[in-house]
Amino acid sequence: DNPDSIQESELQSWVDGGYIDFLGRMDDVKPAITQSAVYVLPSYREGTPRSVLEAMAMGRPIITTDAPGCRETVVNGVNGFLIPVKDSIAIYNKMIQ
């Protein structure tokens, strides 16, 4: 268990409120990524983020945090955007841009 993670009840309230679509675990992510306009990964730290590589392989622009792993994958302004870590307002602003 991750003490920094959100509680399942909080996640469900966001789904119920229409704020997010939560797809859960998927064996094949291609249909979901294909339907998306952009891929967003807010993270504090990553290795090499496989999900970002999958989205990039499908031609999706990336919005992610300037965290280790992510910054080595995304070239800011070229194949995506790097946002300061823990800056949810900056992620939001980039998403609506």
Image (cartoon, rainbow, N blue to C red):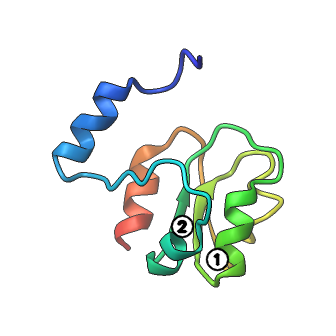
Q: Quadrant of residue 64?
A: bottom right
**Where does the image place residue 68, in percent across and percent down from the top left?**
79, 45
Q: Is residue 7 left or right of residue 73?
A: left
Position of the C terminus, as image quadrant, is bottom left
Q: Few, some or many C-alpha atoms within 10 Å of disc 1 (few <14, some 14-19, many ≥20)? A: few
The mark lying in front, picked from 2 and 1, is: 2
Q: Is residue 38 left or right of residue 45?
A: left
Residue drawn at (75%, 71%), measured in percent from left and top?
75
Estimate the spatial distance between the alpha carbons at disc 2 and disc 1, rounded to whole Å.
Answer: 14 Å
**Is residue 61 in view from this perspective?**
yes
User: At numbered mark 1, what does the secondary structure look like: helix, strand or loop?
Assistant: loop
Q: Which residue is mark 2?
A: 39
Residue drawn at (50%, 25%), measured in percent from left and top?
5
Q: How many marks?
A: 2
Residue 85 or residue 5, whichever sits in front? 5
Asked if residue 36 is positioned above or below residue 71 in the image, the reply reads below
Asked if residue 41 is positioned above or below residue 45 in the image, the reply reads below
Residue 18 or residue 74, whichever sits in front? 18
Q: Which residue is mark 1?
A: 77
Position of the N terminus, as image quadrant, is top right
Q: Is residue 5 left or right of residue 54?
A: left
Residue drawn at (53%, 72%), measured in percent from left and top?
33
**Where does the image place residue 89, in percent across and percent down from the top left?**
39, 49
Marker disc for residue 85: none
Q: Few, some or many C-alpha atoms within 10 Å of disc 2 (few <14, some 14-19, many ≥20)? A: some
Q: Earlier in the sequence, mark 2 or mark 1?
A: 2
User: At numbered mark 2, what does the secondary structure look like: helix, strand or loop?
Assistant: strand
Label 1 is placed on what type of residue?
Answer: Gly
Label 2 is placed on what type of residue?
Answer: Tyr
